[in-house]
Amino acid sequence: MGDEKVKAEATQIIGMFQVLPRLVVFDLDYTLWPFYCECRSKREMPSMYPHAKGILYALKDRGIDVAVASRSPTPDIADAFLDKLNMKSLFVAKEIFSSWTHKTDHFQRIHSRTGVPFNSMLFFDDEDRNIKAVSKMGVASTLVGNGVNLGALRQGLTNFSQNWNTSEKNKQKWVSKFSQKPNSSKEQK
C-alpha cells in the first residue's frame, strides 16, 4: 500500500473520532522503523514501516502535531536517518537521547517544549515498560507489535478517546465535589 493510499485511509480513521490528541509521540526503533539505530551506519539508507509515513502525513494534515521520544545510544544516527527520510521537519519536538530511565524524561522535555498537557498526548512504542511508565503520566499509550500501522492508529485513537473521557469524568467529579458551598448552618453557643 503506497504512502498516499495509507494517508487517505489514515485520514478516514482520524475522521471517525470526535476527540483527537493535540500531539502524537512516536518511538523510533521498531515503532517507526524496523531496526535499532545503534546496529546501523549513518551511510545506510533507512526504511520505515510501510504505513508509518502515510500516518505521519495524515496526522499533520489534520493539524495534529507529532514528536519523537527515543532512547538511543546513537542519537546522531537516528537524527541522520530522519534527515535522509525527509522527516525531520515534521516533528515539533525530537527527544532522542541515551537514557537508562523510563521515557518519562523524554515526555517531561516534550511537555516543557510544547506546552501540551499529558492527557492531550498519544504515544506509540514497541516496549511494554515504556507504555506503562508513560501511561502513569496520563498519556494515552499504545503498544505496537510490528511498527505503527493503520490498526495501531485506530487502537491508539480509541485508547486516547477512552483516556480523555475518563479524564473529563474525573475532572467533572472533582469540580462538583469541591465547588459545593460549605454547610451554612452555624453552631449555636
Image (cartoon, rainbow, N blue to C red):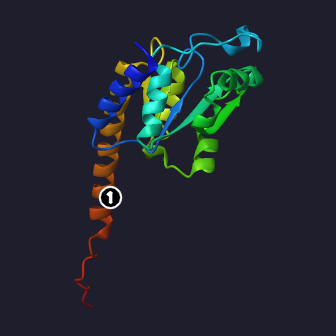
In the depicted structure, whether residue 145 falls above or below residue 139: above
* Residue 89 shown left or right of residue 125 in the figure: right
Q: Residue at x 66, y 29 (%)?
A: 101
Instruction: Identify the residue under disc 1.
Output: 174
Q: Residue at x 45, y 20 (%)?
A: 3
Q: Nearer the viewer, residue 188 or 1?
A: 1
Most distant residue in the bottom direction? 189
Q: Residue at x 47, y 38 (%)?
A: 60
- The x, y position of residue 138, in whole percent, is 45, 41
Residue 159 location, quadrant: top left
Q: Report whether residue 159 is seen.
A: yes
Neighbour class for label 1 at 10 Å: few (<14), some, many (≥20)?
few
- The x, y position of residue 8, in whole percent, is 35, 27
Residue 97 location, quadrant: top right
**Amino acid on which the number 1 mark rests in the picture:** Trp
Q: Report whether residue 139 is seen.
A: no
- The x, y position of residue 102, in whole percent, is 61, 29
* Residue 29 shown left or right of residue 7 in the figure: right
Q: Quadrant of the C terminus?
A: bottom left
Q: The residue tagged with tag 1: helix, strand or loop?
A: helix
